[in-house]
Image: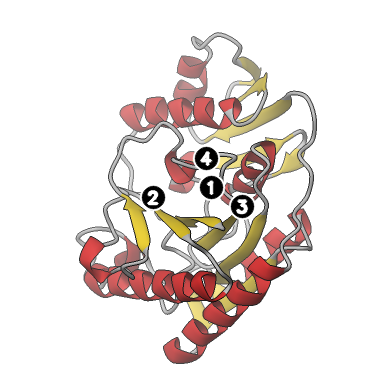
Amino acid sequence: MRIYLSVDMEGITGLVDADDVQPGGRDYERGRQMMAEDVNATVRGALAAGAAHITVNDAHGPMRNLLPEALHPAARLIRGKPKNMGMLDGLTGEYDAMICVGYHSRAGALGVLSHSFMGHEIEDMWLDGRPVGEIGLAHATAASLGVPVAVLTGDDRACEEMTEWDPSVTTVAVKYAHDRFAAELRPADEAHKAIEEAVATGLAGSRGVAAKPGPAVLTVRWQSASVASALQGIPGVTAEDSRTIQAQGALPGLYRQFGVWMRVAASMTNQQPYC
């Protein structure tokens, strides 16, 4: 069994603030240690379920958060950027299941460190008219490759968001949001045990949801009209209004194109992601 882990940081056990997840933050080094521990609990669960090949994609920010020496030796790590498929780089139809580790809720939700891909640069997103963030877009892209999402870990709001997309996904809440930068935390040992057990059972019962056939429509509302205007120079991108653009295409290609949009936006802005 081949298992793919996409690992974000905002939904990791114990982390609640930008200083926990941004390089240079006063608690970032502790945050990356906690990130590795959540990943290792996931790997142990996957091994217990019979996984023979486990790939871990460091999917947060600079994508150099996980230290190779801190990871379980059974895992192979994809580290660094740029990556053509960003948070899903390396995912192919050869994998039997995907696990989302440390994920967070979308922009506008009152979850811990909630946002959609780019802090406040992206105000909202829709996939085929349905509100979407990193969770929904990752799920839809994996489904397009024939890979079910088996497990998600994060705060309770992220778990709820995944359940809305696919109730068959096993979710593990490692903290309970009180606000965007505050949460009630599960003790680390308890959270890691819960992750390990949920992954072992979730992989055994993973079924997933069939991919929607045909092209999808991705719509993004940006904070900046300048970003929306610049992106209209990409063939196939059209404007709904001065700050909202959309494009139609088949996943996973549409996901890769969205990565290009983000690189254009990043070149035009210089703001911290959690302002």
Left or right: 67 in relation to 7? left
Specify which label sits upstream in the sequence, 3 or 4: 3
The reply to whether the C-beta atoms of the residues labelled 2 and 3 are less than 8 Å apart is no
When asked about the image quadrant of residue 202, the answer is bottom right
Q: Amino acid at mark 3?
A: Asp
Q: Amino acid at mark 4?
A: Ile
Instruction: Using the image as rendered, state which of residue 113 and residue 169 is in the foreground.
Output: 169
Q: Residue at x 60, y 40 (%)?
A: 93
| Image mark for residue 96 | 3
Q: Where in the figure is residue 184, as x and y percent of width and height?
A: 53, 85
Decide if residue 107 is in sight here: no
Q: CA distance from mark 1 to mark 2?
A: 10 Å
Which residue bears the numbered disc 1? Answer: 116
Q: Which of disc 4 and disc 2 is earlier in sequence?
A: 4
Cα distance in 3D space between marks 2 and 4: 10 Å
The Cα atoms of the two marked residues, 3 and 4, are separated by 32 Å
Nearer to us of marks 1 and 2 is: 1
Q: Are the residues at dot 1 and dot 2 in contact (C-beta closer than 8 Å)?
A: no
| Mark 2 to mark 3 CA distance (whole Å) | 33 Å
Dot 1: few (<14), some (14–19), or many (≥20) neighbours within 10 Å? Answer: many
Q: Secondary structure at mark 1?
A: loop
The residue wearing badge 2 is 273
Q: Which mark is residue 122?
A: 4
